[in-house]
Amino acid sequence: MSNKKIVVIGGGPGGLETANALARLGYSVEVLEKEEVLGGHIRHWYKLFPNLKDADEVIDFLKERAKNPNITISMGEAMSEMTKNGNTFEIKTSKGRDITADVVIAATGFEAFKAERKEEFGYSVYNNVFTSVEIEEMLRSKGTVTTREGKVPQTVAIVHCVGSRDEKVGNFYCSRVCCICGVKQAIEIRKLLPDSQVFNYYMDMRMTGQYFEELYRESQEKWGVHYIRGRVSEASQTIDGMIQIKAEDTLLAKPVIKKVDMLILMVAIEASPSTAQIAKQFDIEYDYGFIRSRDRHNEDQYTPVDGMFAVGTAKGPQTLKETLADARATAEQVAEYLKTSSNE
Amino acid sequence: MIENIMTKNWGYQISQTRKINLDEVDLTIAQKILDMEPTFRLCISCGGCTATCTAGSFTDFNIRRVNLMIRRGQLDGLYEQLNHCMLCGKCHLVCPHGVNTRKVILLMKQLLSEYESHRQINKEEKNV
Amino acid sequence: MNQIEGKQKIWAEYQKEIGDDNFFFVRSCIRQSFFPGSEQTFLKIMREYLGKRVIEDYRHTTCTGIGYHSDIVKLPTIETVVARHFSLMAENGCENYVPSCVTSFGIYSEILDTWEHFPDEKERIAQFLKEATGRTLATPKNLAHTSDIIYKFRNEIAAKAKFKLVNKKTGQPLKVVEHIGCHYSKMFAKRSQGGQEFPHVLVGMIEAWGGEVIDYPERRHCCGFGFRQYLVMANRGYSVANSYKKFESMEPYHPDFIVANCPGCAMFMDKWQYTIGSMEGRTFDQEGKGIPVLTYEEMAGLVLGIDPWELGMQMHQIPVETLLDKMGVDYDPDKKFLGFNDEQLPKPPEIVFQRD
């Protein structure tokens, strides 16, 4: 159909599904994945909001679809350098291979915010401070939630907006997925540990997706999850190894203090190093290192660089659902681009 | 020479904390209301109830705040505030989350009057 | 993952540049009354034990920080006073400016930062300085608090130590509460040693000299000193309440002593214990005597084997003998209240914190 070389950088959900959709349109695609496994961040995830579907179901679906003669997957091979030479892209891989591509799709994704940057929360200093990602991994590997000493927690606090909406770390933006992830993890903990109490400390609860608000309501109605509107200002360790947190209950205009067995930090979505590298090198950086699309509404799958497309969280915070839809749209736009450019 | 300094007059006292210690507050009334009227759990503090409240326009009665005070175990003075409520039911009508606010008020009055009378008895016992 | 590794990572982010020699030293207003031996001890350690050159100038005055924080002294006034101090430093051929007071350190940091961001303001102050004193404005190459300096030379001091921060009887490290003045690191974390959440400046000394640091929940909380707060009697209630909160929080860890790097903090954490004892009949230690509060110079002095009465420790509200006994420091109780020429000074009464 086309002898143009298409390279997808990144084998997460966005990259994989773009390749899958292109393959089904008859195009040959090569996917570069730096890890030895496919699936990106989602393979660390336990269940997906808002319907608590197993994350594996999505990965299995994507991998099954990728078993297609039009798709070549190069595992454990990262893009190290990429330059544009006339109409083609010259890619150097970590395995020393040189690839010349007509179309490049940046599916380089995000990186979880490094929670130790918010020093006041004591992550990596105090034992029982966790990130939302660690909780997913724990649920996935152990099927339950325990403190680092292996104890069943009685009280858990979830801190929202860690690294998001925070000038102090240079991120003004909202990461969009953490609110609902906090609701989801609160429900999961309450389901597994009926004697536990879970508190969400939030600035705003932003239930932007379909059925998110319903899940939030369910967390209150069915699972008795507590919500305190106020940002946690600092965490310290008590003599019995618990974590003491301070916040203001802003709806009551009074400071509140509480000791919990576990503190979970809802970490932000930040541009991955590869995303930031491409954004910078091609001068297509949206703020914070994400890749800018050509037009937010009309040409959101294109980048300003001719022949380069971007999909998923490489462009900024997105839910998995949005990324998959974005991937299918990207494939369609790539096909349209190739048709138009080959007719010229 | 040994001096007992307990008799000194300092001209000021150690301020009491304004902080609510969520590990120490009494949440039994909150829990009872949550059990007896489960819609109480659904409050998101939007303030619609307070905005429309007949009593709230003319007194310091703030039903949104009272709900939250109960849930944070801040019970002192609440009973007196509840006396301002006219039980008109407009708050129930406007609530976007279907909290049966009228029922919640009645439960609060009942439970807080028990709490207040216990406090009164305790006080009198102490005085005796 | 352990606490120390996590903290070390943070400390690595906040490595402050500190001068090595030729320091221009400026005193604090209140320390000379409340901890009169401390500044002298700093000079002694620097000159006699470390062989450093430290210059003082009798023309140095208050920085007017207390007046500034009490809304009496205006910003251009304090800036001009500070400008004069800097010019004194330059006249003495020094570039490393070392204030002994954390309030002053905060003032200096704030003013240097202001001048950096608003060169017009610096120009204006230079003009004021010229008109008022005929001097030329200079700025220090390095600004470090005296605790930064002791921190920098903590290992040299450890090498000369006669005593360790260890309980001589049990061989266990002494448990130490470290308290950092707010204006040391909360305004400009980058100008501090270790940052604002886990400052390393006192931790580094304590650990180098054999003690064990207590990380208690209210460690980062302000001592409540303020300025208007304690200056006005009616406001003192919430000033003392802040220290109270800290004492309650550290109590379960049974600290052997508290060390602070700020004049106000050390003074209040020492004296508020007396106030609280008087008001409520309680102390926060096990023996009912109060927790001794030291300055870092006193701590360094004890480690180096300097006589506690020479360090000025008889001036503490909470007696320090419990600590001296634990460390095995040799001291003469009869000499506690001897002045110069061994003249006997009046002895304060022994205090008991008990209700009748």
Image: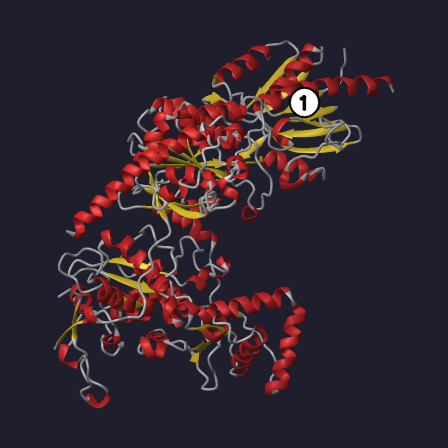
State the quadrant of the N terminus of chain A.
top right
The chain identifier of the residue carrying mark 1 reads: A
| Image x and y of residue A226, in percent | 41, 33
Indicate the quadrant containing the C terminus of chain A: top left, top right, bottom left or bottom right: top right
Task: Locate residue C278: give its quadrant.
Answer: bottom left
Q: Residues within 10 Å of mark 1 (few under 14, many from 20)?
A: many
Q: Residue furthest right?
A: A344
Does B115 sit left or right of C331 as displayed?
right
* Residue depicted at 38% across the width and 55% down the height: C220
Give residue C299's position: percent from left, percent from top.
Answer: 28, 67
C135, above or below C274, in the image:
below
Q: Is residue A190 above or below residue A57?
A: below
Residue underneath mark 1: A7
Q: Nearer the viewer, residue C119 or C206?
A: C119
The foreground one among A204 and A47 is: A204
Tell me, yes or no, if residue C120 can be seen here: yes
- Which quarter of the figure has residue A244? top left
**Which secondary structure lies at badge 1?**
strand
**Picture coordinates of residue C66 (x, y %)?**
45, 74
Res. B96 in view: no
Q: Residue at x 52, y 13 (%)?
A: A60
